[in-house]
Image: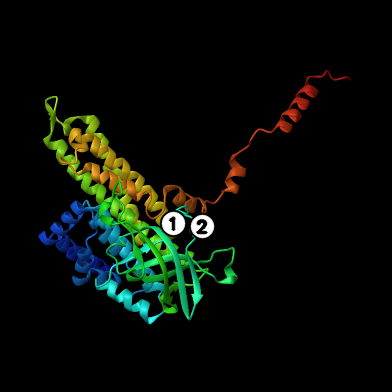
Amino acid sequence: MSLQIETSMSATASFRERLDRLLASEPTRRMIDEAEVAGRFPRGIIELLGQEGIFAAKWQDRPVPALEHTLALSERFGRLGAGGIASGVTLHDSAIAMLRRFGRSERLREVADQAVAGKAVLCISATEAGAGSDMLGLASTAVREEGGFRLRGHKKMASPSPVADYIVLALRGTDESHAGRDDLALFLVPTSQLRVGKQFDTVGARSISTAPVFFDTWVPADMMIARPGTGLAVLSMALAQERFAVAAQIVGACHLALGVTVARMKRRKSFGATLFDHQALRLRVADLQARVDMMRLALNGLIADGAAFNVRSASAAKVTVVRLGCEVMSECMHIFGSAGVLESESPLGRWWRDVKMARIGGGTDEMLWEIVAAGLEPDFVNYDRLVDEWQPEQAFELQAVEQQAAEPQLG
């Protein structure tokens, strides 16, 4: 094993230990529990991660983070059983990714440093009413005005905008060279210049604090992250980071749910035996645990082979893990029986709703499958070698040969 690999593994282990100590502390747990009850994203969690140097260790002076740190951070937040908070941390981190890699102005780099230090909370918003995942269907615009840009429009969902200091907005640019094509642009805007609406009462992940935002404001040119025509590529890069993080988060959430469910099975008795003694239940949980373990190994595989991490693989990871997560939570809630559907007796229902929300945020299943489908490659060589499909003309030729063979030969 090379010294470089040993050093990297040591740094990752140290990062995990620091993170575990922080998240296991009583003040942190209390902050997270209170935020879940209140249904509001705790700004203090970003401040705490910054003060304890978690973001700094993850980013250091790099334009892109170490994926092993992304995996550790997201999986451990998933194990907290607070899906909304985990997602809010992921969005903050994904916004840092945009600013670190593509922020060219001093102002953007300054905000990125503030976010890493936990002194500024960031969020990202692209979704508009009637557009959904269709980035080229956005109606909000950015128009050049007096050395800067006039931004007009609204965003239906922005998380966690009620507590954020800055928001990354995806807008239609006015660069005529991109008219009718990809004219998406990205801007960083202080939330003090926006009107944040009332927080939505979402089905799950309530503590992510999702609300609409409305704006008609001017920003200087140095707040533009991506000019018209490049915004979609930059957003796709950030989404790849977010989707990988969401996959890791759901793996952590599944680990928590399965562990709690096995404990329930070991203690709960039915028909004179523990639930764990019933083979049908035991093997059902074993199947789920095996698949979750394989997903964890797959995410580690993407880290080990850095060249394999891209928009397509991150999309595949997210859609596969989240769908598995929905199955895990549903089965665990089922095994809990009546306690699984009572909010006062177990958190299984809340966890199930949180994971369900993950099938929509960061890209729906269908959109992610389209990204995977775009990379599908046909194997014409083996198709032609192995497939001999029946054709009508072949049947006629065969019939003619058979008739000729059956005719009496003169001679």
The amino acid type of the residue labelled 2 equals Gly
State the residue in front, 34 or 371. Answer: 34
Q: How is the image coloured?
A: rainbow
State the residue in front, 52 or 35. Answer: 35
Tell me if mark 1 has few (under 14), some (14-19) or many (20+) residues whose alpha carbon lies within 10 angstroms of its own.
Answer: many
**Residue 29, x across and y down, in percent:** 14, 57
Q: Residue 214: name its quadrant.
A: bottom left
Q: Which residue is mark 2?
A: 137
The amino acid type of the residue labelled 1 equals Glu
**Which residue extends farthest right?**
411
Which residue is rendered at x = 37% and y = 53% of the image? 361
**Residue 85, x across and y down, in percent:** 25, 57
Q: Is residue 108 visible?
A: yes
Q: Is residue 133 above or below residue 324?
A: below
Q: Earlier in the sequence, mark 1 or mark 2?
A: 1
**Which residue extends farthest top?**
408
**Residue 135, x across and y down, in percent:** 48, 59
Locate the C terminus by quadrant: top right
**Residue 326, x across and y down, in percent:** 32, 43
Callout 2: SS: helix
Q: Is residue 305 visible?
A: no
Q: Which mark is residue 128?
A: 1
Q: CA distance from mark 1 to mark 2?
A: 9 Å
Q: Is residue 67 above or below residue 200?
A: below
Horizontally, residue 175 falls left or right of residue 345, namely right
- The reply to whether dot 1 and dot 2 touch (C-beta < 8 Å) is yes
Which residue is rendered at x = 32% and y = 78% of the image? 110
Locate the N terminus by quadrant: bottom left
Q: Is residue 339 above or below residue 322?
A: above
